[in-house]
Amino acid sequence: MKMTNYLRDAFVSAAMQDVPKIDYDEAIRKAATEAVMAALPKCVREAYEDEKTRPYIETTYLRFGSISVNLPGVSRYQQPALPMLPAASQKRLDELVAKDKAQSSVRDSLQSKLRAAAYACNTRKALAEMLPEFEKYLPADEPAATRNLPAVANLVADFTKAGWPKPKAKTKTAA
């Protein structure tokens, strides 16, 4: 069976779904929020935790690697932004960001290599021979397509029963 770009991309996507991935995004959000909440004054923290007063607390997005986190009590107009994170919290966030970047880099490299291999093959058989371990991600081999024309028995009769062709609107001719 001839491999189309759609089938190649589906193959790569299916194989990449089986590569383990740790969700560092949520870990970064949680660590950043906990660090900022611990650094806030008690009255501001209590106001933010209360659902009734939360809308009155200004929040700002801060970026940690590729992750944006909406945090309370951080002023975008004051430089440096407050509150300053404790060194231990900043170190932990930097480690999580580095792990996320490393994981993304490895996954991108794997996907690129697999995609290059898939696009180098024109048929399913050739790709299965090149990467036999990945055969389970390939689409099922379809039987050779028949070269016969499709059956059209009574096609015109069926269309006529359905009112085909649609009657044309009568137009008045100028005298």
Image (spheres, helix red, strand yellow):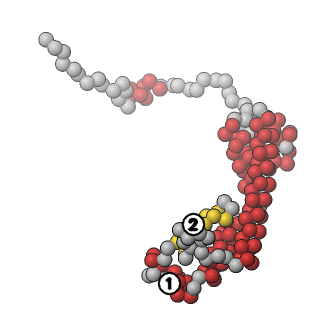
Quarter assignment of residue 95: bottom right
Q: Secondary structure at mark 2?
A: strand
Quadrant assignment for the N terminus: top right
Distance from disc 1 to disc 2, alpha carbons, whole Å, reads: 19 Å
Q: Secondary structure at mark 1?
A: helix
Quadrant assignment for the C terminus: top left
Q: Is residue 30 visible?
A: no
Left or right: 170, with 135 as reference point: left
**Residue ID at (25%, 24%):** 169
Residue 157 location, x and y as percent?
42, 25
Left or right: 16, with 26 as reference point: right
Residue 9 location, x and y as percent?
70, 43
**Residue ID at (55%, 75%):** 72
Nearer-the-camera pick, 4 or 99: 99
Quarter assignment of residue 117: top right
User: Furthest residue to the top?
Assistant: 175
Residue receiving disc 1: 47
Residue receiving disc 2: 61
Nearer-the-camera pick, 2 or 26: 26
| Kind of residue at disc 2 | Tyr
- In the displayed structure, 140 sits above or below 147; it is below
**Residue ID at (79%, 35%):** 120
